[in-house]
């Protein structure tokens, strides 16, 4: 990187906080670097690049309670924290709730990550457009748990968040989500709108943190699908979550199957199917490793959005043997994308797009269109 490519970081914590790595790089340079990385992973530099605002985009952050207040881990340290008053990559609504939580929970008995002692672990703040939630994550073994919950209930009387959750986690696991939780205010679902359709998703589940870029991904996939003759075809939404790809593209297909192994996501998907009148969509709560046991009509198209760890070898093996007209691979990890494409050698890259879902960081989202050789 040339000296002229450097820029002044917007965040006062840059260099100490472990959250961002690229704020000292010009945004154009960040995009070019990510395009190069993706190109090396997929074997072509013919890549469309989509981007939006480089700051104030995130609608989810997990802040840790610590001795000075509420913050993020120090760069290179698991047990030291940078106190954060405002996060430059988070949207204004999220930062407003951060201020609110910091002020209300001053001096609480925080969880010491080294000694594994204390009650208050994390405040998980989510602010998709028009909605909001705060999950206060507690160590379920702490002796002062009742006092902690009582304090959170007091907060529920004054918070501006639409939903407030108490989440209980084991003291020996560094996690911020759990199936053990209770609702203090509102509910345990959030909602977001894409392509004119409203979708709900669990507060405890995965959903994209950058609403604008996620919308661009959905638009891109819908436009790619519409280039094919699909009216008599079937769509498999693999790792389907709450059914976003399935429901948004359902009008283009005869039938659609959502395959997902997280039960709360499947329950949300079923509600999304009903509320969006997507009568040709069905759900299967099953691990993707068991894809070989699923009967899929022909002709077949596939959209898959695996976790950062990539596709399980069993799933890859079956995918490589499936007869499908096109496979749209949504990836957040170029390293695993490279590996998975090498196993899917019956397919070739027809097109590729990069979506800068995570500006100021090395992470990216991509969509690779694969067709049979």
Image (cartoon, rainbow, N blue to C red):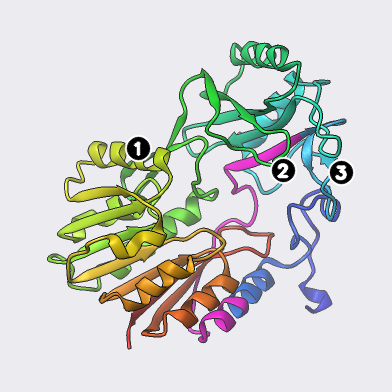
3D distance between C-alphas at marks 3 and 1: 38 Å
3D distance between C-alphas at marks 3 and 2: 18 Å
Circle 2 is placed at which residue position?
A: 87
Question: Visible in this render: residue 192?
Answer: no
Residue 68 magenta: no
Circle 3 is placed at which residue position?
A: 80
Crowding around mark 2 (Cα neighbors within 10 Å: few <14, some 14 to 19, many 20+) is many
Label 3 residue SS: loop
Residue at the farthest bottom position:
373
x, y percentage for residue 189?
44, 31
Label 1 residue SS: helix
Position above or below: 266 against 312 = above
x, y percentage for residue 103?
76, 22
Q: Is residue 96 left or right of residue 72?
A: left
Residue drawn at x 18%, y 68% is: 230
Question: Visible in this render: residue 45?
Answer: yes
């Amino acid at each position: 990187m040339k000296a002229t490519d450097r820029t002044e970081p917007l965040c006062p914590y840059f260099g100490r906080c472990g959250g961002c790595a690229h704020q000292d790089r010009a945004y154009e340079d960040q995009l070019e670097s990510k395009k190069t990385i993706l190109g090396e992973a997929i074997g072509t530099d013919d890549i469309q690049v989509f981007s939006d605002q480089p700051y104030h985009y995130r609608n989810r952050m997990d802040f840790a309670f610590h001795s000075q207040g509420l913050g993020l881990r120090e760069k290179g340290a698991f047990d030291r924290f940078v106190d954060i008053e405002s996060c430059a990559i988070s949207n204004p609504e999220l930062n407003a709730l951060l201020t609110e939580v910091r002020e209300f929970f001053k001096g609480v008995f925080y969880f010491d990550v080294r000694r594994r002692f204390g009650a208050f672990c994390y405040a998980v703040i989510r602010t998709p457009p028009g909605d909001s939630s705060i999950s206060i994550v507690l160590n379920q073994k702490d002796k002062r748990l009742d006092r902690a919950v009582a304090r959170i209930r007091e907060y529920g009387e004054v918070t501006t968040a639409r939903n407030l959750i108490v989440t209980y986690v084991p003291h020996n696991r560094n996690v911020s989500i759990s199936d053990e939780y209770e609702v203090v205010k509102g509910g345990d679902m959030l909602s977001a709108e894409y392509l004119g359709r409203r979708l709900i998703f669990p507060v405890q589940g995965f959903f994209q943190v950058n609403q604008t870029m996620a919308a661009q991904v959905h638009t891109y996939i819908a436009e790619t699908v519409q280039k094919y003759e699909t009216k008599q075809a079937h769509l498999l939404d693999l790792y389907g979550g709450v059914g976003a790809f399935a429901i948004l593209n359902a009008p283009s297909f005869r039938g659609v199957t959502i395959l997902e192994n997280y039960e709360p996501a499947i329950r949300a998907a079923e509600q999304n199917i009903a509320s969006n009148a997507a009568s040709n969509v069905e759900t299967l709560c099953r691990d993707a490793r068991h894809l070989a046991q699923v009967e899929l009509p022909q002709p077949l198209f596939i959209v898959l959005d695996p976790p950062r760890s990539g596709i399980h070898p069993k799933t890859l093996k079956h995918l490589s043997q499936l007869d499908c007209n096109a496979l749209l691979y949504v990836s957040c990890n170029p390293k695993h994308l490279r590996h998975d494409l090498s196993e899917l050698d019956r397919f070739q890259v027809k097109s590729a797009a990069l979506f800068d879902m995570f500006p100021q960081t090395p992470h990216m989202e991509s969509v690779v269109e694969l067709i049979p050789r």
